[in-house]
């Protein structure tokens, strides 16, 4: 008799989730988002983009220091302005 296995919900929860804080009309933000999308073809992670202009508190916090790539897991800043592949790899290594 074969045992039916179901997807391990813990494994699904282990997919790293990132947040990109940026602005719609920001070329550096668009560059980081595109680089992350391209990287998703090789590495398993999810990310969401939050427009800081939607929240005055985010504007006050990040201002011109965008884009900022953060962990949604612990709020750790991974990098800002440009995608730092080494820093992102170090962060993602925690999930391997």
Image: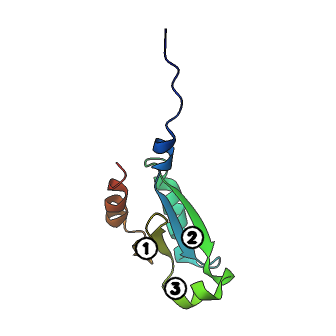
Mark seen at residue 82? 1
Give the spatial CA distance, label 2 vs label 3.
16 Å
Left or right relative to 64: residue 51? right
Residue positioned most to the right: 54
Give the spatial CA distance, label 3 vs label 1.
15 Å
Q: What residue does disc 2 label?
A: 30
Residue drawn 58% across and 84% down? 58
Left or right relative to 48: residue 74? left
Kind of element beneath mark 1: loop
Picture quadrant of residue 25: bottom right
**How far across and down, in percent of the image, does residue 53 sit?**
65, 83
Within-10-Å neighbours for mark 2: few <14, some 14–19, many 20+: some
**As rendered, which of 68 and 94 lies closer to the eye?**
94
First in residue order: circle 3 vs circle 1: 3
Q: Nearer the viewer, mark 2 or mark 3?
A: 3
Within-10-Å neighbours for mark 3: few <14, some 14–19, many 20+: some
**How far across and down, in percent of the image, does residue 74 sit?**
43, 67
Give the spatial CA distance, label 2 vs label 1.
10 Å
Mark seen at residue 62? 3
**How far across and down, in percent of the image, does residue 86 sit?**
31, 63
Residue drawn 64% across and 88% down? 56
First in residue order: circle 2 vs circle 1: 2
Kind of element beneath mark 2: helix
**How far across and down, in percent of the image, does residue 96 sit?**
34, 48
Vertical placement of residue 24 versus 85, above or below: below
């Amino acid at each position: 008799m074969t045992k039916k296995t179901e997807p391990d919900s813990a494994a699904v929860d282990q997919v790293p989730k990132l947040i990109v804080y940026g602005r719609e009309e920001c070329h550096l933000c668009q560059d980081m988002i595109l680089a992350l999308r391209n990287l998703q073809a090789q590495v398993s992670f999810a990310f969401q983009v939050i427009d800081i202009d939607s929240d005055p508190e985010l504007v006050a916090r990040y201002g011109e220091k965008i884009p900022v790539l953060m962990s949604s897991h612990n709020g750790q800043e991974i990098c800002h302005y440009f995608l730092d592949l080494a820093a992102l790899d170090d962060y993602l290594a925690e999930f391997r």
